[in-house]
Amino acid sequence: MDSIIPLLSDPAAWVALVTLIVMEVVLGIDNLIFISILTNKLPEHQREKARRIGIGLALIMRLGLLGTVAWIVQLTEPVFELFGHGFSWKDMILIGGGLFLVWKATKEIHHNVDPEDHKEDMVGTAVASFSSAIAQILLLDLVFSLDSIITAVGMTPHVPIMVVAVVFAVTVMLLAANPLANFIEKNPTVVMLALAFLLMIGTTLIAEGMGFHVPKGYVYAAMAFSALVEVLNMVSRNARRKKKQGTLH
């Protein structure tokens, strides 16, 4: 493994580092949205702990995967062919993770639309919810970590640069986890928007696994546009609420 010290004098290494950090932070948004929605379902005193454990596991998993870069690269080699497309282990992991995200997002949307069904479903599951949440976070961490590491390998051959980028991105996730989760919880319409994001991300993962490349720029542009519309809606609602309160006084 090459040392980080000689790379500090290489401008190309700095460019790669900054680019990789930005990419890792953007890719971490998907993971963070999932963690926020999942942990908000836990009792309030368990939420922060679950987020820290989930994000900590993400860091450990990504650093562990970086130590097996040569093995990870081999995951992109086709294992079998179906309908003219060679499926690799990476493809199968992406498809499995995508199906899980689609199932989870659909289930959560159903619970939000039908609160009574949600209450009945939660009966008798409170004890297992914390460990279940950690297990689900760990599962998605694996999918997102694998995707980000393979992307990183394609951008730079220097493992120390990847390590710095991953640590920086996970630190940002750790700092943003509680504010994002609290914001989502206080704004019910944002919950539905975030679930729609997860549904789209899951569909994108399935498409990627099936061999259909979906430019991530399009996905994040759609997410940014939807988020902007929601922000405008929130501003409009607050303005109407203040106007109504002013009229009453």
Image: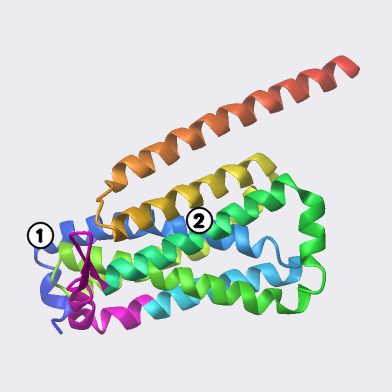
Query: What residue is at 34 percent from the left and 79 percent from the top?
Result: 63
User: Which of the two discs, 2 and 1, sits closer to the camera?
Assistant: 2
Q: Secondary structure at mark 1?
A: helix
Q: Quadrant of residue 74?
A: bottom left
By what rule are the colours in the image chosen? rainbow
Tell me: 9 left or right of 134.
left
**Label drawn at residue 33:** none
The residue pinned by badge 1 equals: 12
Query: What residue is at 77 percent from the left and 23 percent from the top?
Result: 242
In front here: 174 or 200? 200
The x and y percentages for residue 80 are 21, 73
Which amino acid, mark 1?
Ala
Residue 177 in sight from this viewpoint:
no
CB within 8 Å, label 2 to label 1: no
Look at the image and give the residue range highlighted in magenta.
Answer: 62-88
Q: Please give the count of numbered marks on the rendered protein.
A: 2
Q: Residue furthest front?
A: 83
In front here: 190 or 84? 84
The x and y percentages for residue 57 are 48, 78
Q: Secondary structure at mark 2?
A: helix
Whether residue 2 is in magenta: the answer is no
- Crowding around mark 2 (Cα neighbors within 10 Å: few <14, some 14 to 19, many 20+) is many
Quarter of the image with the C terminus is: top right
Q: Quadrant of residue 136?
A: bottom right
The residue pinned by badge 2 equals: 102
In front here: 153 or 214? 214
- Crowding around mark 1 (Cα neighbors within 10 Å: few <14, some 14 to 19, many 20+) is few
